Image: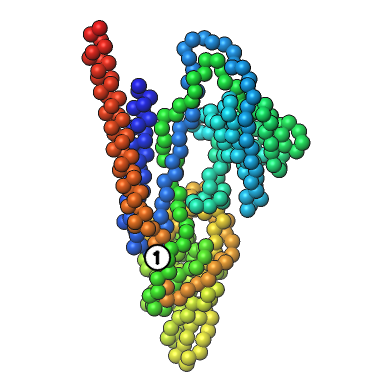
Amino acid sequence: MFRGIYTASSAMQTKQNQIEIISNNISNVDTTAFKKDVGVTEAFSEKLLMKRENVEGYLRANSNNVKVSNKTLKNGLVKTDIEISRGYLTLEDKNGKGYYKSASVVRDDEGYLRTVYNEYNSNDITKFGAYLLDENSNRINVPEGEITVDNSGNIISGGRQVAKLIVPEARKSIGTINSGTLIDRVMINFNQGAQERTENPMHISLEGNGFFKVRLDSTDDIKYSRSGVFTMDNSGVLRDFLGNIVLSEDGSEIKVPTNSRSLEFKSDGSVVSLNSDSQREQIAKLALVDIYNKEDMQKYGHSYMQMTNNAQAIEHPFGGKVLQGYLEKSNVSAIDEMVDMIQMYRGFESDQKVINAYDQIMQKAANEIGKI
C-alpha cells in the first residue's frame, strides 16, 4: 500500500522537475543561441518481491528464449542487446542492484559490460552506467568484440565461455517492482538553431558543431559561447554583448586598428580589417573549437558554457564555418515545449488521483476493518 504512494509521489516530483525544465526552455525561446535542456529520468532499480514463506530452491529450469543482437557504433564500440524470457539479468548502479528481463550493454575501457547513456537524439555515448553482473553478483569482464549468449545464460566471447549471467527464478519469487522514477540529470541539446539574417556586420553565427572562446573580465575564466553579438570598446578590443573579451586562436584579445572602417569575418574565422585606404588586413583569427566531450559541459548563464568540475575539455578543430550578418536562434520549439508541458500536467494530475485513492483505501481500512 505504502509502496504505491511512494511510487506515485516520486512520479509527481519527477514531473514537477520536468515542468521547471520546460518552463525555463520556454522563457529562453528568443535567447540567441540558447540550447534547450532535457531532463533524463531514471527508474529506481527493479527489486525482487519474495513470498514470506521459507520456500527453498529454484523453479524448474525450463527452456529459456534468449535474444542477442550486436550493433557496432560509429565510435567502434559494440552495443549488445540481451533479452531473456526466464530468470533475471542483474544490473548494479549507484542505487544498488536491480533485476531485469532485458539490458543493452557496451564494453567499457576496462573491459566490463555496462549500460550507457546516449547523447540527445543520437547514438553517441556520453557516459557509462550500471554494471552487468553474473549469477554470483560479480562484474562481467569480456575481451573486445561481439558476444553471444546461449539459452543457458552463458556469455561466449572470443570463442570461450566468460560467465553465466542469468539468475534463475527462486520458488518464493513473486516478480519485480520499482519505486518510481527520478531525474537522473539534465542534458543539453546541442542541436543547431535556425540562422537568422540580421545584416549587422558585427553579428556572426557558427554553422556546425563548435564554439568560440570568451574571457570573462571579472574572473579571467575562459568560457565557450555561440552567441555572436560582437562590439568594440573604446580601445578597439573586440568584445561580446556582455563586454567580455573575444579571444583569438593564440589566446590573446583581438584589437582592431584605429584606422579600421569595418570588419569582415571570413568563413574560417579570420578577422579582416578594411582600413581608410580600402586595404584589407587580417588582424586575427577567432578561437574556434569543437568540444568532443560535450557531456561534461554545463551552462554558466547568458549562453555561456563551461566544463563541469574536474573535467578537461577535449578540443578538436572547428569543422564548420562562420556566417557574418547572421545570428543563431534558440533551438527551442515553443509548440513542442507546450505539448510536453500539457502532458506533464496531465500525468501530474493522474498521479495525484492515485495518491488520493490509496489514501481513501487506508482510511477505510483503519475505520471500518478495525470495527470487525
Residue 87 visible somewhere in the drawing: yes
Residue at the (41%, 40%) spot, across then down: 183
Q: How is the image coloured?
A: rainbow
From this view, report whether residue 171 is shown above or below residue 252.
above
Point out residue 274 in the picture as x, y percentages from the top left corner. Answer: 47, 86
Q: Is residue 175 left or right of residue 4?
A: right
Q: How far from the left and from the top, in percent, is residue 82?
A: 61, 36
Q: Which residue is mark 1?
A: 329
Residue depicted at x 54% and y 68%: 320
Side (left or right) of 60 relative to 287? right
On the image, the x and y values in percent for residue 143 come to 72, 39
Q: Please tell me whether mark 1 sits on a helix, a strand or a loop.
A: loop
Which residue shows up at 62% across the image and 30% down it? Answer: 65
> Which amino acid type corresponds to the residue marked 1 in the rendered image?
Lys
Relative to 239, 58 lies left or right: right
- x and y percent of residue 50 in the render? 49, 17
* 127, above or below 87, in the image: below
Looking at the rendering, which quadrant does residue 44 occupy? Answer: top left
Mark 1 crowd level (few <14, some 14–19, many ≥20, 10 Å Cα): many
Q: Quadrant of the N terminus?
A: top left
- Quadrant that contains the C terminus: top left
Q: How many marks?
A: 1
Residue 25 seen: no
Up/down of 247 relative to 85, above or below: below
Q: Furthest-right residue in view? A: 159
**Measured along the vertical axis of the image, is residue 166 above or below residue 183?**
above
* Most distant residue in the bottom direction: 277
Considering every residue shown, the one lying at the far top of the view is: 372
Q: Is residue 106 left or right of residue 218?
A: right
Residue 86 quadrant: top right
Judging depth in this view, the residue of 46 and 233 nearest the camera is 46
